[in-house]
């Protein structure tokens, strides 16, 4: 089992409609290939965690890398894992632009701000910590399947 994390910049402002479109495509593909994970989106960046069999994760990332909706794709990590963190999630989408103000401030204080937006980290442990921080909040953002 493998986990791949990448970050990219969107070529257009990210909206819920764009996240829903991506999630719809992901649902179809991921259910067939055994991929699970989470997609975080700010107004300008994507951060995605993919988990599953090596070949399927690699194929999925290669397809994503060719997607014309984003640029500046940075591979954060691609590692062997003992178990999935996101197995029961399938693929979920989180609009980080839609957080409650207290959580948004806490995340910005902890992870940083760039151009007024939350910085999506480039360290695997920080990515997983951020996902956990968002998940543990009492007022969770809208999780999309």
Image (cartoon, rainbow, N blue to C red):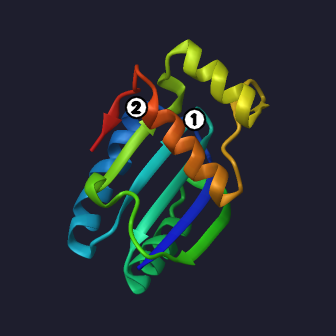
Q: Between 120 and 87, which is closer to the camera in this rendering? A: 87
Disc 1 on helix, strand or loop? loop
x and y percent of residue 41 in the render? 52, 40
Q: Crowding at label 2, few (<14), some or many (≥20) Cα neighbours within 10 Å? A: some
**Mark 2 or mark 1: whose residue is earlier in sequence:** 2
The quadrant in which the C terminus is found is top left
Q: Which residue is mark 2?
A: 16
Q: Between 36 and 18, which is closer to the camera in this rendering? A: 36
Residue 117, relative to residue 89: is it above or below? above
**Residue 71 shows in the view:** no
x and y percent of residue 32 in the render? 21, 72
Name the residue at 57% across, 76% down. Answer: 79
Name the residue at 41% across, 86% down. Answer: 55
Q: In this image, 31 relative to 54: left or right?
A: left
Q: As drawn, which residue projects farthest toward the bottom?
A: 55
Q: In this image, 128 relative to 113: left or right?
A: left
x and y percent of residue 113 in the render? 76, 30
Whether label 2 touches label 1, CB < 8 Å: no
Q: As drawn, which residue projects farthest toward the top?
A: 101
Spatial CA span between label 2 and label 1: 10 Å
Disc 2 on helix, strand or loop? helix
Q: Between 9 and 137, which is closer to the camera in this rendering? A: 137
Query: How many numbered marks, from 0 up?
Result: 2
Q: In this image, 4 relative to 20: left or right?
A: right
Q: Which residue is mark 1?
A: 42
Name the residue at 56% across, 13% down. Answer: 101
């Amino acid at each position: 089992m493998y986990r791949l994390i990448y970050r990219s910049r969107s070529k257009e402002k990210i909206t819920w409609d764009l996240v829903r479109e991506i999630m719809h495509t992901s649902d179809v593909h991921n259910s067939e290939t055994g991929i699970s994970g989470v997609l975080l989106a700010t107004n300008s960046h994507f951060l995605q965690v993919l988990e599953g069999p090596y070949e399927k994760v690699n194929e999925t990332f290669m397809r994503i890398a060719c997607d014309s909706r984003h640029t500046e794709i940075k591979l954060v990590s691609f590692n062997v894992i003992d178990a999935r963190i996101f197995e029961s999630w399938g693929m979920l989408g989180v609009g980080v632009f839609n957080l409650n103000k207290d959580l948004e401030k806490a995340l910005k204080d902890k992870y940083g701000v760039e151009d007024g937006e939350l910085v999506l980290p480039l360290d695997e442990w920080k990515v997983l910590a951020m996902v956990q921080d968002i998940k543990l909040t009492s007022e969770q953002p809208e999780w999309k399947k």
